[in-house]
Image: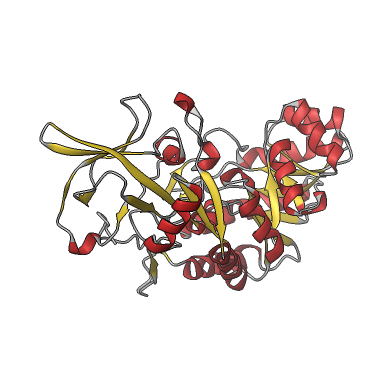
Amino acid sequence: MNSSATSAVLPVRTGVDHAVRFSKPVLSFDQARELSRQYGTPTIVISKSTLTNTYRTMKAALPNVEMFYAAKANSDVSILRPLFQAGSSVDVCSYRELQSALLAGFSPDQMIHTHPCKTIQNLMDCYNEGVRWFTVDCSGEIDKLVRYTPDVNVILRLAAASTSSLINLSAKFGCDPVDAPALAAEAGRKGLKVRCLSFHVGSQCLNPEDFRTMLTRARLAWDQCVAAGAPLEVLDIGGGFPAPYRTGVMSLSDYCRHLSTALDATFGDLPIRIIAEPGRGMCAEAATLITRVVGKSVRGGLPWYFLDEGIYGSFSGKLFDYSDFELIAEAADVRPRSACIVAGPTCDSHDVVSTDQELPDLEVGELLLVPTMGAYTSASASGFNGLDIARVVEID
């Protein structure tokens, strides 16, 4: 397997060695050739067993936490259905995500709606389908619920800080924890019931100790909200569970055990429900992209390889999610490798997939495998330049 990353991320320093996981494809090149003959390329291959095993690993290490898969990461039914069958619930942010969840088997009472700023149409469509848990983070959203859906359960989202997260999801949403009691009291005066506090430490949170820091702040806000009259009964710890890309990350079981210890230390004395919203951490490793070399040239002394997939398609995570994906060529360990540029299929010069990975001399028609392609890839892909979005195929 070709990887330009040789160091692993070991974020928690406690004197104990932690297992590390690295990205790996969910299928072999022989399987890839067979699937490409059947379906063409680019194709994203979803491994149902990998998805189910990830869910079971999370549940085993966090037995008292209910999983609400964040459909935002990938709302394809091929992801949602195995998670429904495994016992997960689901977190939706729009009516289309809700429709995908219904198609996969989920019922509205297995859903929470976590978009803090909803259009009226979004709110009403999801409400009319039966969803009854909605998120707010300000007075304006409280008033929206009061006017249109006064009988719902309210999730009050706190802003969170993280030192190790790739994306700060509190840059746009979440109230300051010090303002939470006043907002909870306001909601109560207006007839709403704030039953849940939530936060999100940020996407691709490498260090589970960031959860402990936020849990400590959340516990203070919790106690203050209860004192202000909020009938709190649920803590939503959001997502942030990391996935391996070109650099390894802590094993999922170790990561979740650290989180479990932090939960016990901060909320272990309360008889409450605890839920989580894993997205990337649940689905990313379950998918591998099969893409084909469609052209090659030499420019500026460097070989250029052109693929039939690029940053406007499944590699969109490079732009929107700051992810860097490993490109794997067959028998790369026994073929001489060199620096090269790998580009996508559109006419846009910005459509460059990689500038710093060494690959063998690739032939036109050769297949590459790209692991960890389940989250924020096809979900944010477009049909720019009139090109099709990658087909999705399920295995095992």
Name the spot of residue 240 as percent of width and height, x first: 52, 52
Quarter where residue 247 is shown: bottom left
Residue 288 seen in the figure? no
Question: Compared to 35, does 307 lie above or below?
Answer: above
Residue 184 seen in the figure? yes
Front-lying residue, 207 or 129:
129
Name the spot of residue 84 as percent of width and height, x first: 70, 59
Question: Compared to 141, does 97 lie above or below?
Answer: below
Front-lying residue, 38 or 318:
38
Which residue is located at x 61 percent, y 51 percent?
238
Question: Compared to 310, does 372 lie above or below?
Answer: below
Q: How is the image coloured?
A: secondary structure
- Image check: 187 left or right of 113? right
Quarter occupied by the N terminus: bottom left
Quarter occupied by the C terminus: bottom right
**Count of numbered marks:** 0
- Image check: 391 left or right of 105? left
Spot the residue most to the left: 301
Front-lying residue, 174 or 322:
322
- Image check: 68 left or right of 384? right
Quarter where residue 72 is shown: top right
- Image check: 333 left or right of 22? left
Name the spot of residue 5 as percent of width and height, x first: 27, 56
Front-lying residue, 132 or 11:
132
Name the spot of residue 237 as percent of width and height, x first: 62, 54
Which residue is located at x 34 percent, y 51 percent?
368
Question: Compared to 23, does 151 lie above or below?
Answer: above
Spot the residue most to the front: 37
